[in-house]
Amino acid sequence: MNLLTIGINHQIAPLEIREKVALTPEVISDAMKDLRSYLNQDEENNPSEVAILSTCNRTEIYCAANDHHIHDQQIQEKTIDWLSAQRRMNKSELTPYIQTEISSAAVRHVFRVGCGLDSMVLGETQILGQMKQAVAQAQQAGSIGTYLNQLFNKTFAVAKEVRGTTEISTHAISMASAAVRLSHRVLGAIDQQRILFIGAGEMINLCAAHFSGKSPKQITIANRTFERGEELARMIRDQGHPCESIALSEVPQRLAQFDIVVSCTASSLPIIGLGMVNTALKNRRHQPMVMIDLAVPRDIEPEISKLRDVYLYTVDDLGKVVKEGMEFRTNAVKSAEEIINLQVKNFMHWLAQRSSVPFITSLKQRSEELQRVEIEKAKKRLNRGEDPADVMTELARGLANKFMHGSLHSLHHVDDDSVDDYQKVLTKIFMTESKRGGSC
C-alpha cells in the first residue's frame, strides 16, 4: 500500500479556484463513494481507500492504494480527471494548482495539516475538528479502511502531542483573541463576566464570536442603528448565548452593569468619557473593569486609563499581544516539526510491517508444509517400531535441512559482489536464533 494526498489549498490556489472545487457536506459522502468506485474499476482485491477534506482553505483527497496494481501517477491523473468532471472544470484549469505528496511526504503533509502548521492562521485548531468530521463521513460512506484509519488516528495523536508540548496554539494571534486573553488576564474566567459591545461592524462581530465561545454571563450589543445591533444579537442568541441589544443612548445609564466593554465604531469623537466611567465605577463600588478600544479615532477617552479600577487597552496594546503571540507560535514550529518527523518515521515503519504481512504469511505456510512432511515421516518410522530417540533426531535434522536448503542454495549461486552481504543476512537470521534457543 502507498499513501497519497492530492489537493488544492490556500497557499497555491486563489479563492476563485478553491471555491470551484469545494464540496459541500451534503454531497461529500456520495463523492467519496463515487471516487473510490472510479479508482477501483480494475481492482477488486485490496481496493483503494479514499477520504476527502473540504474547507474554505483547502480541498484535499487522501488515498491509500495498492501500488502493485495502480501507480501513483495513475491515481493522480484519475483523481484529477474525476475532480474536473465533478466540478465541471477543464483539467488544464485545475492542474497548475494541484499539490501531490506521496509516501512519507504524504504522511508528513497530513500530520502538518492536522497540527495547524499548514493553516492560514498558524496553529489554529479548527482544522482538526474539520478533519475528524471528514473521517467520520468517510467511515460512514465505507470509503476508508485499515490504512487511512491508522493514518488519521495517528494524525490526531500527533496533533494532541504537539499542542500539549509546544506553544503552537497557546498565544493570541488576532485582535479578537488578544482581547479575550487580556480580559481573562485581568478578571479571570470569562464565564463570570458581563460584556458590552459597542458597534456592530466586522471587528465587533469577530470579538463577539471569540467572547461568546467562552460563555459569558451576559452579552449586550449597543449600536447607533438599533436594527443592526439587534441582528448581531439575534445571531448570538441563535448560538445559545444570552444576548440583548440596546440603543447607544442607553450606555451611560447601564455602563456600571458591565465588567468588560469592547468598542469599535466609526465615530469621530469619543463615545465614552471620563465622567461617565467615574460614575459607573462608583455604582460598581470600584469593582475593576476592562475596556478595549479598537476604534481609530478612539471611542474611549485616553484619560480613563489613569483611573485606578479601569484597565484600558487600545489597538496598539492588542497589536503587541498579537506580535508576541506570533513570535511564540513561530518559535514553536521547530519543536512541532521535530515531533512530526519522528512520528512520520514511526508510521512508515508500521506501514512497512503491514506490507510484510503477506510475505510472512507465505513463510509460515511453507514452514507448516515442511513440518507436515517431516512429521508424517516420523509417524511412519514410529509405527515400524524404530527407537523414538532416533526418530526425533531425524525429525529435527530433516526440518533443519529443509529450512536451510533454500538459503544455502541461494548462497552458492549469488554473484561474488553480494556474497558478503548475503552471508551477513544469513548469520543474522540463523546464528541469532540459535543463540536465543540456547539461552531459553
Image (cartoon, helix red, strand yellow):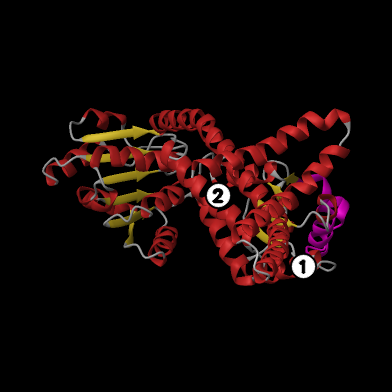
Looking at the image, which is closer to me, 56 or 335?
335
Give the magenta-colored segment's residue range.
Answer: 76-99
Q: Main secondary structure of the magenta part?
A: helix
Q: Is residue 271 left or right of residue 275?
A: right
Q: Amino acid at mark 1?
A: Asn
**Mark 2 element type:** helix
Residue 274, image quadrant: top left
Residue 122, position as x, y percentages in the image: 54, 39
Between disc 1 and disc 2, whose residue precedes?
1
Residue 426, position as x, y percentages in the image: 72, 38
Residue 332, placed above or below residue 56 = above
Sort mark 2 into few (<14), some (14-19) or many (20+) by Cα contacts within 10 Å.
Answer: many
Q: Is residue 278 left or right of residue 438?
A: left
Which image quadrant: the N terminus? Answer: bottom right
In the rendering, which numbered label is found on residue 45? 1
**Mark 1 element type:** loop
Q: Is residue 87 magenta?
A: yes
Identified at 86% across, 55% down, the residue is 91
Pointer 2: what residue?
155
Q: Amino acid at mark 2?
A: Thr
Identified at 65% across, 65% down, the residue is 24
Residue 372 shows in the view: yes
Residue 372, placed above or below residue 153 = below
